[in-house]
């Protein structure tokens, strides 16, 4: 389990360090911000496809967790966590095509560092070594929990100060 604070850190790092991902984050925010006022309301989120993808009860909890300043609105930076949750929930095993829920897969850390396409495997395919990862082999695969922890470890010194504000640090609900 990671906290919403940690999710915020990982998602901000991901969407700020990759050009394609940054553009995707902007499009995602603009799509959710139906009235174009620069804020996403609970109503805008609850009326979106995110509820279909992640579930109504989960989205209610996620909204509380990602609203770091608890003002009732989701800012652009806060919306990156919602996008990351949505994208992470859509991962597929590169070998068999199964959906990978959080905690049920392995990801290639080297692909992430090189900003290449994600390379994910389910338990069964990872253990069988039935797929060849031609670029990096199996040395750089990390289980989901270790993968997110590694991202946090690698990036903590480079974090913008706003990500470590007292409001967000005190907001540590678990996913």
Image (spheres, rainbow, N blue to C red):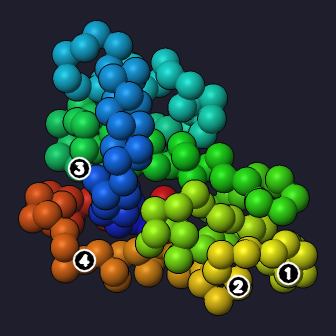
Q: Secondary structure at mark 2?
A: loop
Marks 3 and 2, how far apart at CA: 37 Å
Q: Residue at x 42, y 26 (%)?
A: 45
Determine crowd level at label 3: few under 14, some 14-19, many 20+ residues with C-alpha closer than 10 A.
many
- Marks 4 and 1, how far apart in space? 32 Å
* Residue positioned most to the top: 35
Q: Nearer the viewer, mark 3 or mark 4?
A: 4
For residue 68, the mark is: 3
Percent position of residue 76, x then y: 25, 37
Q: Earlier in the sequence, mark 1 or mark 3?
A: 3
Q: Is residue 68 left or right of residue 147?
A: left
Tell me which numbered mark, 2 or 4, is placed earlier along the sequence: 2
Give the secondary structure at mark 1: loop
Res 5 → quadrant: bottom left
Discs 3/2, front? 2
Would you name the residue on which mark 2 appears?
138
Looking at the image, the residue that sits furthest to the front is 134
Question: Label 3's element?
Answer: loop
Q: How far separated are the C-alphas under marks 3 and 4?
A: 18 Å
Q: Given contact means CB atoms under 8 Å apart, are the residues at marks 1 and 2 in contact?
A: yes
Marks 3/4 in contact by CB < 8 Å: the verdict is no
């Amino acid at each position: 389990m990671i906290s919403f604070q940690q999710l915020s850190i990982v998602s901000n790092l991901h969407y700020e360090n990759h050009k394609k991902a940054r553009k995707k984050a902007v499009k995602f925010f603009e799509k959710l911000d139906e009235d174009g006022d620069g804020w996403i309301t609970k109503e805008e989120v609850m009326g979106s496809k995110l509820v279909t993808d992640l579930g109504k009860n989960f989205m209610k909890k996620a909204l509380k967790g990602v609203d770091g300043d608890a003002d009732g609105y989701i800012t652009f930076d806060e919306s990156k966590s919602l996008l990351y949750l949505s994208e992470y929930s859509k991962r597929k095993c590169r070998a068999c095509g199964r959906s990978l829920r959080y905690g049920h897969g392995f990801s290639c850390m080297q692909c992430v560092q090189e900003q290449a396409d994600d390379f994910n495997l389910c338990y069964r395919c990872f253990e069988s070594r039935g797929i060849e990862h031609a670029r990096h082999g199996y040395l750089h695969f990390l289980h989901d929990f270790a993968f997110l922890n590694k991202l946090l470890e690698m990036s903590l010194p480079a974090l913008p100060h706003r990500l470590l504000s007292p409001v967000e640090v005190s907001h540590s609900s678990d996913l």
